[in-house]
């Protein structure tokens, strides 16, 4: 049982969320560097839509829009970038393992006498925020984050706080296994919201652009949710073996996790697209928001 095997993870799980977006940011930067490395001498643009460019390099990329060649870019492979990509992918896998220990660790901590769940959340996320504070101050002084991005990070942190507070309060009356399975539903939630956003965007384009391709799929594709549903089913099979008992109020509170974490992921994606250099400050602001709402609930 995870409740009996993860007592040492309490200290580690409190800081896992603060490292996740740093790893994701470095990963995104590595992908960007690996896919766009070129020199000005190697990039050429065609003079007309019908112009063509010949190249003997196997790494030449042709960008073709509506059947015409607009530009040709030579991409130089970089072995160091490939190594960096795999390094940060490995870091994310490690963080997923730490995330998994979070449920059991929180359950063990709150099982101790006189431990208040909200006070535990305040201490946990305040410690993680203080760990990122020195680097965040330096990033702010360098102008790596705008006021608009900071406001977006605060909104994102509010959604994450909603998920974490529901998780913490839910673990008072439900099991770590049940809470973990309910949390994994954010995979299906995010996939469903993303597909709904895609359908809405396509329909808006059809209304705004007269020449829009009518063959574009504008219906909600349920098959896009299948991989996420299979992943949740797999977690449920592993975690819920022999877990009986009637539903509790903690189970209901735990459903704040897929909603809060799901909207947090969607918000974070937009923030990192606009300001990839602000990952450290965004993480710090998110942790501060979770600590703040935990303190308000504690009071």
Image: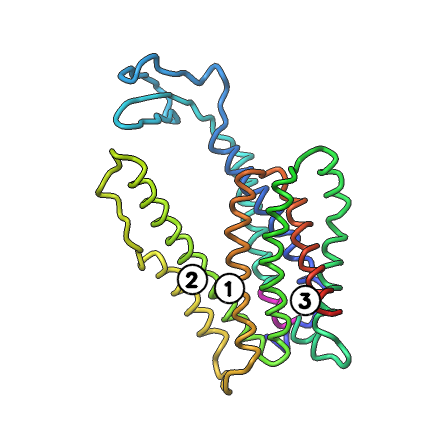
Crowdedness near tag 2: few (<14), some (14–19) or many (≥20) residues, C-alpha within 10 Å: many
Asked which secondary structure carries label 3, the reply is helix
Asked which secondary structure carries label 2, the reply is helix
- In the rendered structure, are the residues bearing label 1 and label 2 in contact, judged by CB atoms less than 8 Å apart? yes
Numbered mark located on residue 77 in the image: none
The residue under the point 77% across, 45% down is 134
Marks 3 and 1, how far apart in space?
Answer: 22 Å
Mark 2 lies on residue: 188
Crowdedness near tag 1: few (<14), some (14–19) or many (≥20) residues, C-alpha within 10 Å: many
Q: Is residue 128 left or right of residue 90?
A: right
Give the foreground label among 3 and 1.
Answer: 1
Marks 3 and 2, how far apart in space?
Answer: 27 Å
Mark 3 lies on residue: 9
Magenta residues? Answer: 100-105
The residue under the point 52% across, 56% down is 263
Marks 1 and 2, how far apart in space?
Answer: 8 Å
Picture layout, residue 233 above or below residue 220: below
């Amino acid at each position: 049982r995870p409740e009996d095997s993860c007592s040492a993870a309490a200290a580690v799980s409190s800081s896992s969320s603060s490292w996740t977006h740093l790893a994701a940011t470095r990963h995104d930067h590595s992908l960007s560097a690996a896919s766009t490395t070129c020199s000005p001498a190697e990039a050429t643009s065609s003079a007309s839509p019908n112009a063509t460019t010949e190249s003997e390099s196997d790494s030449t990329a042709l960008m073709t829009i509506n059947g015409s060649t607009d530009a040709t870019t030579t991409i130089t492979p970089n072995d160091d970038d490939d190594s960096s990509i795999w390094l940060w992918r490995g870091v994310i896998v490690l963080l997923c393992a730490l995330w998994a220990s979070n449920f059991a660790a929180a359950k063990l901590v709150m099982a101790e006498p006189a431990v208040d769940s909200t006070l535990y959340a305040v201490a946990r996320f305040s410690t993680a925020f203080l760990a990122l504070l020195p680097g965040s101050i330096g990033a702010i002084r360098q102008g790596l984050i705008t006021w608009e991005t900071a406001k977006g990070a605060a909104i994102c942190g509010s959604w994450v706080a909603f998920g974490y507070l529901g998780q913490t309060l839910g673990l008072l009356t439900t099991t770590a296994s049940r809470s973990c399975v309910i949390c994994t539903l954010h995979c299906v939630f995010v996939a469903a919201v993303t597909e709904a956003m895609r359908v809405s965007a396509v329909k808006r384009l059809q209304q705004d652009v007269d020449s829009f391709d009518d063959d574009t799929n504008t219906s909600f594709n349920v098959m896009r949710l299948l991989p996420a549903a299979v992943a949740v089913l797999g977690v449920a099979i592993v975690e819920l073996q022999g877990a009986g008992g009637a539903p509790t109020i903690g189970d209901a509170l735990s459903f704040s996790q897929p909603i809060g974490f799901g909207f947090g992921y969607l918000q974070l994606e937009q923030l990192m697209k606009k300001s990839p250099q602000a990952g450290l400050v965004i993480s710090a602001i998110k942790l501060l928001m979770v600590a703040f709402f935990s303190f308000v609930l504690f009071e």
